[in-house]
Image (cartoon, rainbow, N blue to C red):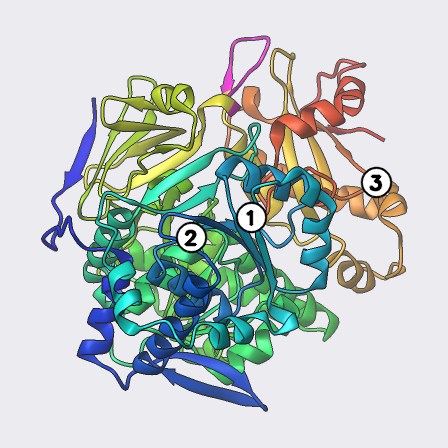
Amino acid sequence: MVQFEVPAIVPADPQANITDLLVERVKATPDLALFAVPEGGGWRDISAAEFQKQVVALAKGFAASGIEPGDKVGFIARTTYDWTLVDFALFYAGAVMVPIYETSSAAQIQWNLSDSGAIAVITEHPEHSARVAEVRAELPLIRSAWEMHAGDLDKLVTAGADVSDDEIERRRNLANGADIATLIYTSGSTGRPKGCVLTHSNFVELTRNASRSNREVFETPGASTLLFITTAHVFARFISILNIQAGVKTGHQPDTKQLLPALGSFQPTFLLAVPRVFEKVYNSAEQKAEAGGKGKIFRAAAHTAVEHSRLQQEGKKIPFLTKIKFGLFDKLVYSKLRTAMGGRVTYAVSGSAPLGPRLGHFFHSLGVTILEGYGLTETTAPATVNQARKSKIGTVGPVIPGVGIRLGEDGEVQVRGVNVFKEYWRNPEATAEAFDGDWFKTGDIGSFDDEGFLTITGRKKEIIVTAGGKNVAPAALEDPIRANPIVGQVVVVGDQKPFISALVTLDPEMLPAWLSNNNLPADMSLADAAKNDAVRAEVQRAIDIANKHVSRAESIRKFTILPSEWTEASGHLTPKMSIKRNVILADFAGDIDELYAVPVNTTNVSLS
């Protein structure tokens, strides 16, 4: 059994809780700008001391309103400064936050609030409040509901004016490391969401070790980041807390359509994103170049960037001609993309799905090292992450100090250490099933290289076994296909079938630009585009590229383009944009059956 385990580099403190991270930060650097909020056309800094003052004032409001230590409080809001303010105020009040995705349906909200036993809920705006109101009759434990847009945070602060500092200090110190810090529900991609009990030690020990092991990213003077992925997800929540621990300045931009202007004005030193964001940046730049008659130049620049980065990583000598082309394209293409990202980004932390080597090498040549990592809600986000000092594109890096990973006999990734959650809330059966001793069984399949860098190859439950007995990992085919600008999502099918096929959806954001660049009507509907010969040829091209990475028995032989898209609203994607494979297989069973209605012998045939 292959196993890699790295001792913690920061001594554990079993008595510490998350609030201690802020107390230590204020004590060390009270005047350090810990946050920046939009103001006018720029940003206004908020110091560590000012943030703590606001946290305490709001915590007093929660105490005055009847929130007791240990109470569960639901929270639905976008990614803004107020999100972390509420988070820490609840910690200071001794309460336990139950974050809920702001895109969640009324039924999902009802489940999270009722299962957790929440006694109060905070929403950001009327739309969120309306969804709560739909199911309020099914939530008898909810005593209080506050809406931020209605000014309720200010009202809470006013209501708590008479609560003493000593009372908040008492509450703040009640929890120790082993106590519950938050209850985060899984995305529900494989069934009903389960509540993950994450402790204070999970966050305290993991942030301390992760920031120290990647100090070039987080502990460099002037380090800053602009958060735009949802803070309800453990990935951004972990980084938000780590930034306070490490003294990183954090800004927020909940509207991704305003991301580029925000990056230009905020000028972060590192980014936190999921692979789909990097794909969008690349594809948008390519289509913009195509529209300006410079598509050929962009593709040549991208090819040179990837080649240059690959040679660097392999330690090979870079040919003189490649150096010349790289220097030329740096002025023509790369520098403009760097400027678009704010001009100061040197690192990007990527997680939640595989990035793919092509994008990793492309951004590396831009001067942005993408530190791909791996983890789950159950591991408080990262279990592994590439290091600033040494990263390997195509891997998710080595284990974080304080964490151990072993591979089961079937290649399943199993984790133990400071980051592993305590249990599933009120679900002892699921908890017992998820552990082998103190090792958490992730359900993911992976492999290590000789230096302990992990590569994730697929999910155990998603492995397809064809009628011929061939094991196929869908991700190996899906990820390169999804990188195509017009592809929205793709699901590979073929379990117990004679060959592999694929269901494909189109990207409604990228499709118009591609259509225009290919002399087709930009306003073509998804249904019409799905039948268009040029569109089908482009999807076929993406599939051909993916097929080059696998054997013939694993290659996609047929595909169909669906006339609609998969979204969170349609029930086919999770809030972090992961596909709900089981739901898709059920909802599109007829389309799958049609793919296999007529046998094929050729390598690739599209279904009209």
Q: Is 256 situated left or right of 372 in this image?
A: right
Q: Which quarter of the image is occupied by the N terminus?
A: top left
**Mark 2 = which residue?**
235
What residue do we see at 56% from left, 19% from top?
Answer: 553
Q: Tell me which residue sits at (53%, 76%) in the image.
A: 154
Q: Which residue is mark 3?
A: 563
Q: Amino acid at mark 2?
A: Phe
User: CB under 8 Å between callouts 1 and 2?
Assistant: yes
Measured in 3D between alpha carbons, the distance from the residue under mark 1 to the one under mark 2, in whole angstroms, is 10 Å
Determine contact: label 3, label 1, CB under 8 Å.
Answer: no
Closer to the observer: label 3 or label 1? 1
The residue sitting at 78% across, 64% down in the picture is 517
Q: Which residues are magenta?
A: 462-471
Residue 582: give x, y in percent of width and height: 63, 26
Number of other residues with Cα within 10 Å of mark 2, as a class: few under 14, some 14 to 19, many 20 or more: many
Q: Is residue 544 above or below residue 216?
A: above
| 511 vs 535: above or below | below
- Residue 86 located left or right of residue 485: left
Q: Is residue 468 magenta?
A: yes
Counting residues from the start of the chain, the first of labels 1 and 2 encountered is 2
**Residue extending furthest toward the top:** 468
Nearest to N terminus: mark 3 or mark 2: 2
> Which residue does the numbered mark 1 point to in the structure image?
576
Q: Quick check: 120 left or right of 582? A: left
Q: Amino acid at mark 1?
A: Lys
